[in-house]
Amino acid sequence: MALWTWVGTHYEKCPWYSLSKGMLPAVLYGAGQSLNTADIVEQGAFRVVQNWAVKKVEPHIWIGMDKPELFGKQHMDTPFRKIFRGSYADEKVAGIPAKEYPETYFIDVEPQDKSVLFFNRGLDCKFFWGKNTMTVALHLILWMGFKHIIFSGIDLCGDYFDNRILDDKLKLETDRLLLEELSFMKWFSNIANKQGILLENRSDISRLKEIEGIETCNITA
């Protein structure tokens, strides 16, 4: 199954790709430093929030690929839709399997050619696993049918809205992952433009400004 949820006795597939989006844009929120000055509402847009950006932005959909226990019971009890990696459905948080919390969904991911972001659709597709939440979130947004994607708090610079301090080992690993994400976004922008998908960046400090095909506009001071 592509995206699914537990309904008490069995899992059900979620056909969110079939929902009518019209011209509604999707905003993908990240935890970069610019999130502190971002428009956290984006009136008229659908908010997809990654990981700890949820501390500032109320999502329509939240997505994180780490184990549910990392986010804790308070997060699991929230009423908005939460998406975790499919293999974590039975992971327990405060003694309760993740699948039994409200509005909790699971997404099937696997390593494969990144071009599937633009082609894998339907109830039984596998989502692209690029070893980070952002690539899964982008595949989800495209799978749901959005043609206009806004990036907010996606800085790819290694500084965060909550001023977290990383130890040397984690900082090296994070810097490596951010470079991989930047390289991915250069590829993604090129293909997205050819597919008629509009990309916008809301951060004036984001490295997305380096990428042709991603327009930087409407920065909130």
Image (tube, rainbow, N blue to C red):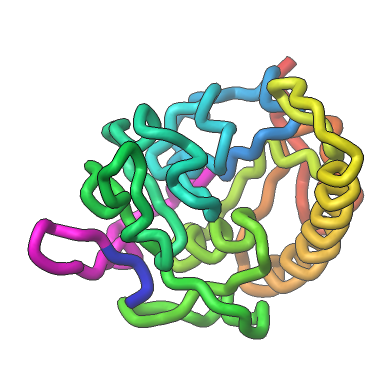
4 vs 155: above or below: below
Task: Name above or below for residue 186 compared with residue 77.
Answer: below
- The image position of residue 73, as x and y in percent, is 36, 33
Q: Is residue 102 above or below residue 35?
A: below
Q: Residue at x 43, y 71 (%)?
A: 108
Query: Which residues lie in the magenta part?
Result: 5-27
Outermost residue toward the front in this view: 95
Report whether residue 211 is seen.
no
How far across and how far down the image is residue 218, in percent?
70, 29
Left or right, residue 114 beside residue 76: right
Q: Is residue 169 left or right of residue 220?
A: right
Give 146 or 122, whichever is nearer the viewer: 122
What residue sits 75% from the left and 25% below the top?
164
- Name the residue: 34% across, 81% down: 124
Query: Residue 30: which quarter of the image?
Result: top right
Residue 136: in sight, yes or no? yes
Quarter placement of the N terminus: bottom left
* Figure disc tally: 0
Q: Specify the quadrant of the image occupied by residue 163.
A: top right
